[in-house]
Amino acid sequence: MLEKEILLIPGPTPVPPRILRAMSKPQINHRGPEFAQLWEETQAGLKSIFQTKSDIMVFPSSGTGALEASIVNLLSPGDKVLAVSIGVFGDRFAKIAQIFGAKVQKLDFPWGEAADGEIIKDALKKDAKIKAVLLTHNETSTGVTNDVKAISEVIREQDKLVLVDAISSLGAIDLKTDLWGIDVVIAGSQKAFMLPPGLSFVSLSKKGWLAVEKAKMPKFYWDFVSLKSSMKKSQTPYTPALPQLFGLRESLQILKEEGLKNNFKRHKILASATRQGVKALGLELFAQGRFASQTVTSVKAPPGIEIKSLRKIMREKYQVVVAGGQQRLSDKIFRIGHLGWVDKLDIISLLSSLEMTLSELGYSLKLGEGVKAAEEVFLKVRDA
Ligand SMILES: *Cc1c(COP(=O)(O)O)cnc(C)c1O
């Protein structure tokens, strides 16, 4: 392939050459001292990204594996769970709990909007038997970020466990695991961590570990207790995904060099430039206001323009890859991922190719208007 592709989907995200190089190392003994050091180094880095003192469990799986692991390790069949959903990934978390025998009460909010803490509070007050709440931090299917800080406070007041899917946010949007008292935080490698798919991460509070002791859902490979006992020796119970862990060490190093605060700020600026650019072209955002995500922007299809054709032209003519909508949003929106290894010029390329594509599809616009609006955001930050 001669062309360089600009991958702007909400995962997998582009992988920096530094990480690719780190991954292509000879394998090591996963029960030897070199591995122990690798494990300890990555633990230290992960804890700073999770903003927690707890150890971080690492699994060789995509994010969904860790969602399942969290369910089966914290719950027993028959346990009541409140599953808060604002889109496809909230639905998935609920479904996993249901399949393993939890009594799931769904609390759905309209797609494109965030969850309302007051409504969650009412639901919890109405049913004292609810043991845990499932929550999505950043709903990738709609481009909406929940106010996890405020919502987890409500949940803690009611003394329930809170499990947060932070797969498309951790490392790009602020989430203070310990300070906000979140029992379970789940993340994945192929989003803000800039790694290929294939690693998932789980942090667990003290209260979470107490729940693990009592949980009776079946598990073997995903057993937190056996992982914890191996981790005491800086090992894993089963063969770890070594190349992924080599890559993780480099990813954490890159994140440390940038600094978490700068990283959050960069994502915020990229998101703002994307939104301003899209709006300047007369397109409508799907997620509105302060809940619009810092990592993924969802855009409504302009009247008369097919998402499929738009994405095809962008990909084939300009090598810019954006995502479509999922499920009932499939022909309604397209989604731009701006997380991980993404910078200003990626957003400029995106808007520029979007302008040329829309123009080819007969949409009336002034070339350069989207790019200009994004540039204004970047210049404002530069001059601030
Ligand atoms: C990507 C993602 C997942 C997990 O998907 P996998 O394909 O299993 O990695 C789960 N939740 C959210 C919010 C996501 O963005």
Image (tube, rainbow, N blue to C red):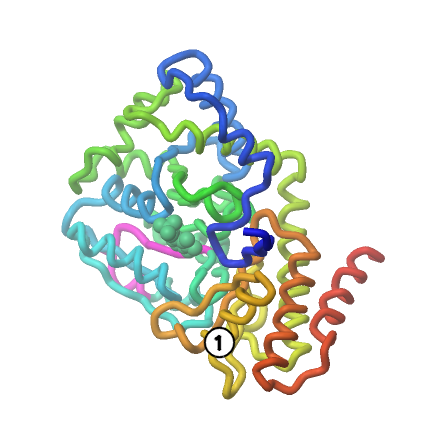
In magenta segment, residue 97: no
Residue 147 image point, x, y percent = 50, 59
Choose between 192 and 324: the one closer to the eye.
324
Judging by the rendered image, the residue that carries numbered circle 1 is 309
In magenta segment, residue 134: yes
Residue 313 image point, x, y percent = 54, 71
List the single residue furthest toward the top.
33
Residue at point 44% right, 50% down?
A: 166
Residue 113 image point, x, y percent = 46, 71
* Mark 1: amino acid: Ser
The image shows residue 208, relative to residue 3, as above or below, that is above
The image shows residue 326, relative to residue 255, as above or below, that is below
Residue 155 visible in this rendered orientation of the protein: no
Choose between 3 and 305: the one closer to the eye.
3
The image shows residue 5, relative to residue 220, as above or below, that is below
Residue at point 72% right, 69% down?
A: 371
The part of the image, by quadrant, that contains residue 252 is top right
Residue at point 34% right, 41% down?
A: 61
Q: Quadrant of the C terminus?
A: bottom right
The part of the image, by quadrant, that contains residue 197 is top left
Count residues near mark 1 (Cα–Cα under 10 Å), then give few for <14, some for 14-19, many for 20+: few
The image shows residue 222, relative to residue 352, as above or below, that is above
Region rendered in magenta: 123-137
Residue 267 visible in this rendered orientation of the protein: yes
State left or right for residue 336 relative to residue 166: right
List the single residue furthest toward the right.
383
Choose between 122 and 151: the one closer to the eye.
151
Choose between 275 and 154: the one closer to the eye.
275
Residue at point 38% right, 43% down?
A: 184
List the single residue furthest toward the front.
2
